[in-house]
């Protein structure tokens, strides 16, 4: 469909709580998801939330097979998740580097639950339930945070663990 402009940190729309999707299988929802998929692919994202393109609805997408922004992570199946809910199925937390299309060129270390169960619906209203761990769980938590107006820098415990990608990871900048 179309590659949409991604809002950047500082835009007040990114801080809003999104509203639930009430109707599934609509042309409007299909077009939104198509635009999100095109936008995420064009920017080498691992996930994207509707608020990042200015649509305050509880819709996220995520997935990757191989990605130059995250060269060492396991594949994640492409998923459309509407009106998601997350349950933490382990109290174990892992610290890891995150980036975001709304915070371009930067990375920060964020603590996230290692194992989660997420539920919600696909774009047609079919119920989904999945357990995830590691990077997959991190991506789901990151994208769902967007639905509540939370950007990952808000979760960084120590700002010494926040900086520009090309400075923190010069090997990735050289490979690109």
Image (cartoon, grey):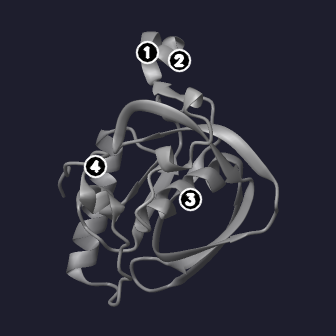
Q: SS of the residue at dot 3?
A: helix
The one of 149 and 138 positioned closer to us in this rendering:
149
- Cβ atoms at labels 2 and 1 below 8 Å apart: yes
Label 1 CA crowd tier, 10 Å (few <14, some 14–19, many 20+): few
Locate residue 25 relative to residue 93 in the image: left or right: left
Which residue in the structure is indicated by mark 3? 140
Q: Is residue 71 visible?
A: no
Q: SS of the residue at dot 2?
A: loop
What residue is shown at x 36% (from left), y 43% (from top)?
Answer: 101
Which residue in the structure is indicated by mark 2? 169
x, y percent for residue 74: 65, 41
Front position among marks 4 and 3:
3
The one of 147 and 172 positioned closer to us in this rendering:
147
Locate residue 138 relative to residue 50 in the image: left or right: right
Which residue in the structure is indicated by mark 4? 39
Q: Could you tell me how far apart the alpha carbons at marks 2 and 1 are, in whole angstroms?
A: 7 Å
- Cβ atoms at labels 4 and 2 below 8 Å apart: no
Q: Could you tell me how far apart the alpha carbons at marks 4 and 3 are, in whole angstroms?
A: 18 Å
Which residue in the structure is indicated by mark 1? 173
x, y percent for residue 91: 82, 61
Q: Could you tell me how far apart the alpha carbons at marks 3 and 1 are, in whole angstroms?
A: 26 Å
């Amino acid at each position: 469909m179309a590659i949409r402009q991604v809002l950047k940190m500082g835009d007040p729309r990114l801080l809003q709580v999104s509203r639930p999707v009430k109707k599934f299988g609509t042309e409007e929802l299909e077009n939104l998801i198509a635009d999100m998929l095109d936008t995420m692919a064009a920017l080498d994202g691992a996930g994207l939330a509707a608020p990042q393109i200015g649509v305050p609805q509880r819709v996220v997408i995520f997935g990757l097979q191989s990605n130059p922004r995250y060269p060492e992570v396991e594949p994640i199946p492409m998923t459309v998740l509407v009106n998601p809910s997350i349950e933490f199925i382990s109290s174990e937390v892992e610290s890891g580097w995150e980036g975001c299309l709304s915070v371009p060129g930067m990375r920060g270390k964020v603590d996230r639950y290692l194992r989660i169960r997420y539920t919600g619906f696909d774009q047609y209203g079919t119920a989904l339930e999945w357990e995830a761990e590691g990077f997959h769980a991190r991506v789901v938590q990151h994208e769902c945070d967007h639905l509540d107006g939370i950007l990952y820098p808000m979760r960084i415990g120590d700002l010494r663990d926040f900086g520009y990608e090309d400075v923190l990871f010069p090997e990735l900048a050289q490979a690109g």
